[in-house]
Image: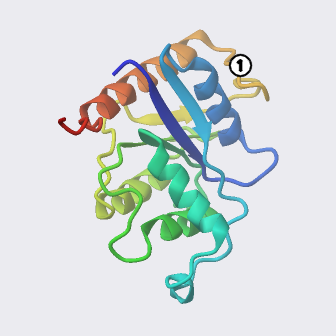
Amino acid sequence: MSDRTIGYIVGSISSTSINRRLAKALERLAPAGTTLVEIPIKDLPFYSPDHDADYPAVATEFKNAIDEVDGVIIVTPEYSRSIPGVLKNALDWAARPWGQGSFDGKPTAVIGTSQGGIATAAAQQHLKAILSHYNAPTLGQPEGYVQTTPGLFTDAGEVTNDQTAEFLVSYLEAFGALVDRYARVPASA
């Protein structure tokens, strides 16, 4: 595939999120022909089935943003050995109304960073279980557990460690290959 647009969701709404810095690093390191765009979640209200018959505009825009990209990278922190509530809320919006899930068949990747040695491994396992239920083909390897050290990522998305930068490039290339495998086949004339 010559050009692809990858959406990314940052599972934190914190203004000082190290996962947002990781997302910015991915955006900066994207290989030629790949554009990364954020799909924001901070303005989504709490999901309730009461909205299924009349989705709020912000939720419709969120679902449309997922539909418009070739694949989605979810950059998640780990809160209490799981994903943040704000991310789960966004995923609930994406999955509804029943039968209209935005992640159905959408190539997806999961990555995250924390200061701990196992990074966001427990959160990613929970997230991958959710994505499996949504029928989202999810990148299995390489796994994206990134341990943050002070200064590893700048606010502008620069990576100060060459090995980490190389890993992130290889991660993006592997996800690009998954996206390409699931690329939409043009309708025959």
Residue at point 77%, 25% (across, down): 156
Query: Which quadrant: the N terminus?
Result: top left
Query: Which quadrant: the C terminus?
Result: top left
| Quarter holding residue 154 | top right
Outermost residue on the top side: it is 162
Q: Position of residue 83 (x, y in %)?
A: 54, 59
Residue at point 43%, 76% (across, down): 97
Outermost residue on the bottom side: it is 50
Q: Position of residue 104 (x, y in %)?
A: 32, 57
Q: Is residue 13 left or right of residue 163?
A: right
Q: Position of residue 31 (x, y in %)?
A: 49, 16
| Quarter holding residue 173 | top left
- The reply to whether residue 94 is visible in this rendering is yes
What residue sits right under mark 1 in the picture?
A: 158
Count the labels in the image.
Answer: 1
As helix, strand or loop, the secondary structure at mark 1 comes to loop
Task: Tell me if mark 1 has few (under 14), some (14-19) or many (20+) residues whose alpha carbon lies within 10 angstroms of its own.
Answer: some
